[in-house]
Image (cartoon, rainbow, N blue to C red):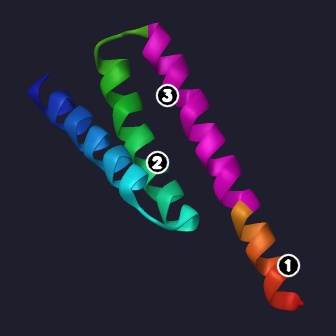
């Protein structure tokens, strides 16, 4: 259980770093990996509300990262 608490703390730190990152493209990997760590913690405590919340958060972050990369690629081609 202590391991999952450490993983949860890591997730919080990663998401905090993402919030502090200045570039939007740099934020998303922090959000994704922080979300995955918090998902693991949520599963360990068997809290369905936070499990669903983290899954939505991770999917939204992946979607945003893909959208930003597509936008960046279109800008480079011009």
> Residue at point 82% right, 82% down?
75
Instruction: Give whichever of 72, 62 is nearer the camera.
Output: 72
> Residue at point 44% right, 39% down?
35
Q: Earlier in the sequence, mark 1 or mark 3?
A: 3
- Residue 37 versus residue 20 in the image, above or below: above
User: Decide: marks 1, 3 in contact (CB < 8 A)?
Assistant: no
Q: Position of residue 46 (x, y in %)?
A: 36, 10
The residue wearing badge 3 is 54
Q: Quadrant location of residue 65?
A: bottom right
- Give the number of the mark in front: 1 or 3: 1
The residue wearing badge 1 is 74
The residue wearing badge 2 is 31
Taking the magenta stretch, the answer to whether it contains residue 65 is: yes
> Residue at point 63% right, 49% down?
62
The number of numbered discs placed on residues in the rendered structure image is 3
Q: Earlier in the sequence, mark 1 or mark 2?
A: 2
Taking the magenta stretch, the answer to whether it contains residue 69 is: no
Q: Position of residue 8 (x, y in %)?
A: 25, 33
Q: Position of residue 57 (x, y in %)?
A: 56, 34
Q: Residue furthest right?
A: 78
Q: Main secondary structure of the magenta part?
A: helix
Q: Which residues are magenta?
A: 48-67
The N terminus lies in which quarter of the figure?
Answer: top left
> Residue at point 79% right, 68% down?
70
Q: Quadrant location of residue 18?
A: bottom left
At mark 3, the secondary structure is helix
Circle 2 packing at 10 Å, graded few (<14), some (14-19), many (20+), is: many
């Amino acid at each position: 259980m202590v391991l999952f608490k450490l993983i949860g703390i890591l997730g919080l730190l990663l998401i905090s770093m993402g919030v502090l990152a200045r570039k939007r493209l740099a934020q998303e990997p922090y959000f994704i990996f922080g979300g995955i760590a918090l998902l693991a913690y949520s599963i360990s405590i068997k809290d369905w509300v936070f499990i669903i919340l983290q899954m939505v958060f991770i999917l939204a972050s992946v979607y945003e990262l893909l959208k930003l990369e597509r936008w960046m690629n279109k800008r480079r081609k011009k």
